[in-house]
Amino acid sequence: MKRLTFFLPLVLGASSFLSAQVWTLAGPQSRHSHTAVYDPTSAQMIIFGGQETSIDTDLNDVWLGVTSSNQDDRFTQLLPTGTVPAGRYGHVATYDPTSNRMTIFGGAEGLPSPCANDVWILEGANGSGTASWTAAAPTGTAPAPRVYSAGAYDPTTDAMIVFGGNNCSTGYFNDAWVLTHANGVDGTPAWHELQTSGTPPSARESASAVYDSVNNILTIYAGDAGGAGFGDVWTLSNANGSGGTPVWAQLSPSGTAPKPRTGQSAIYDSGEDRMTIFGGVNGGATLTDTWILTSSNGIGSPSWIQITTATTAPSLAYHSAVYSSTANDMYVFAGASTADKLSTNSHAFTFYGANGVTKAGSKWVLGGPAVRYSQSVYYDSSSNNLFVFGGQHSKTNLDFNDYWEATDIIGSTNLKWTVIHASGPIPKPRFGHTGLFDSVSDRMMVFGGGTGYPGPCVNDYHVLENANTQGGTPTWVTLQPSGSLPPVRQLHSSVYDSVTNTLIIFGGYNCETSYYNDVWVLKNANDVSALPSWTELAPTGSAPSERESSSAVYDSTTNTLIVFGGDAFGTEFGDIWLLSNANGTGGTPAWTELTASNQGPSARSGHTAIYDSVNNRMTIYAGYNGEHILDDVWILSGANGHGGTATWSQGLAGQLRRFHSSVYASSSNQMITFGGETNLNPLNPNSDIYTLTDANGLMRPSEK
């Protein structure tokens, strides 16, 4: 993966340190027009290249991906040796499972020009053994450079078959080519243009191709030539260049045909002779429909059947799709979309029962957590895993109560999501709630939140035992704490004092018309030694104004709650407040407003904050300023009011986010962020994990 790496040469403020902050994405970047092939031995897709359109970057990374109908999702980056092919999209890729070699051809290396016609071979493509790139030098006259060709592989003769494409301008092809010895093992690859008979398909790009190796028949479907998509189906007999003259024939399947389209995917079940097509573009909109063509090799009576699924399909084009004949599942990765929540994405989906025959019911399953915001997140340093609970999908009533684990967060760009099915009474779906972790007792504590949009708000309390999955089955327990309960609320800020086992909450919104500036503490919060008990604090001093969506961090050394920002009635705040004796012990709590020595971040809400207690530095990230979603990072030194003058310095900007989650890995000085909104309207929520190195703005000793 190409990391998005930037360096900030100067950190502003009283203490000027050089900073080497870097943002790193876990898992593959979003992309379209990439390729994926399937390795049945390791049951994973091998992904190469594509285009990341938000930054107009052509990619040349390799990822091994696994998704499944139980929602697990895993992406491991492969780092081959040798000279790496130039970044590209719209290329052809084929795979030989016997030799474990992937072969790629052509594609576009710009936007789109120039087109390529080079051939590369990746040995050890499934991650078993040493992976290595080799530039092939085929004999024969090569096809003209092109993008968006259709391609297929004949494992019997080790041949790559290529059809059509575009010359990166206004020229389109309908020629057919065979690359023999495509895996490069038993001989030098060689190009041969097929001399076909019969009327060929019209010239086009972005067609789909599947291949019947038993009968040596290539089937071509749809595509476009600079205008509306096609909806025709063609077969090419003797397609691998042996057995006789290759002959084109157009099929006329019975049944209602799919809409014309381009940029769709197709997979083939050779046992049932069924081609399954999915998605694509028609009339400028990406599609969600799935169709099966029976007798797709043209032997018999081809017929179109539309598949009705039990779950909502993604809206995609220029994605990749591979097929497991063993599981009868189709695995789809990334692609472009006109749907707000996908756009250019890095999501993986499983289409269960892909041939429409051998499984009861077909359904779409998203790999990993759905996009969301206002979830709760915690990081478990003992396992190096991140956990996510709840949140909201979009500006609707679709709230979550699912629980996810992402493993090996710090020190790796790989991504592995597992859904955790806890026992016990699961809390209602919610967002804007408290979800904090006690590592000593291995328990997550959940309070309040909104259970619709935005309400009703609740003030219930739940504990998840064995939360990090290391000590046994996670189990939900619903509790009735003693004392008067806080009023119902969402989007409050909350912290946990592990020394006194106290949960502290501040402010929030009641899902109707009221905002809060009250402070409540919950003693015995983890429910280990005694029943939790609520107490409202009565701080002295002038309190912050009522608000929601502020950030709060806690300094256990001085027993100080540090609050920044928030909003109420359409006004964002940029003030800093300190609450002494915040856990309810040590004396009467007191509010004090902290004034920094210099100009800092703009007023905002829906941002996040982390705290480095050793250096007394609070880092805030992104949020919303009343007009725009932000991406900036700011560090406040002297944040607890006890360590000298409070001073703001600016860090390295990240991604546009609000209502995301951020947690701090103190041992590596990294901030981990997950999810959040990336746009105002539509909301475009997200499910990415990013880490920021040197999160406190201080260089590591070796960098000073």
Image: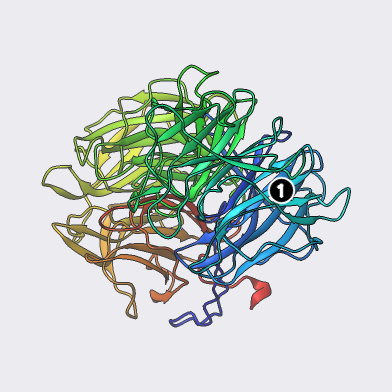
**Residue wearing tag 1:** 160
In the rendered image, which quarter contains the C terminus? bottom right
Specify whether residue 524 is in view: no
Specify whether residue 549 is in view: yes
* Depth order, front residue of 227/357: 227
Question: Label 1 neighbourhood size at 10 Å, few (<14), some (14-19), many (20+)?
Answer: many
Q: Amino acid at mark 1?
A: Met
Q: Give the residue displayed 21% in from the left and 32% down from the top.
A: 484
Q: Give SS at disc 1.
A: strand
Question: Residue 538: horizontal and vertical position, in percent?
Answer: 21, 49
Question: Residue 545: horizontal and vertical position, in percent?
Answer: 17, 59
Question: Residue 376: horizontal and vertical position, in percent?
Answer: 39, 43
Say if 165 sits above or below 635 in the image: above
Question: Residue 340: horizontal and vertical position, in percent?
Answer: 33, 51
The residue furthest front is 198
Q: Quadrant of residue 7?
A: bottom right
* Depth order, front residue of 306/339: 306
Q: How is the image coloured?
A: rainbow
Residue 78 located left or right of residue 566: right
* Depth order, front residue of 186/326: 186
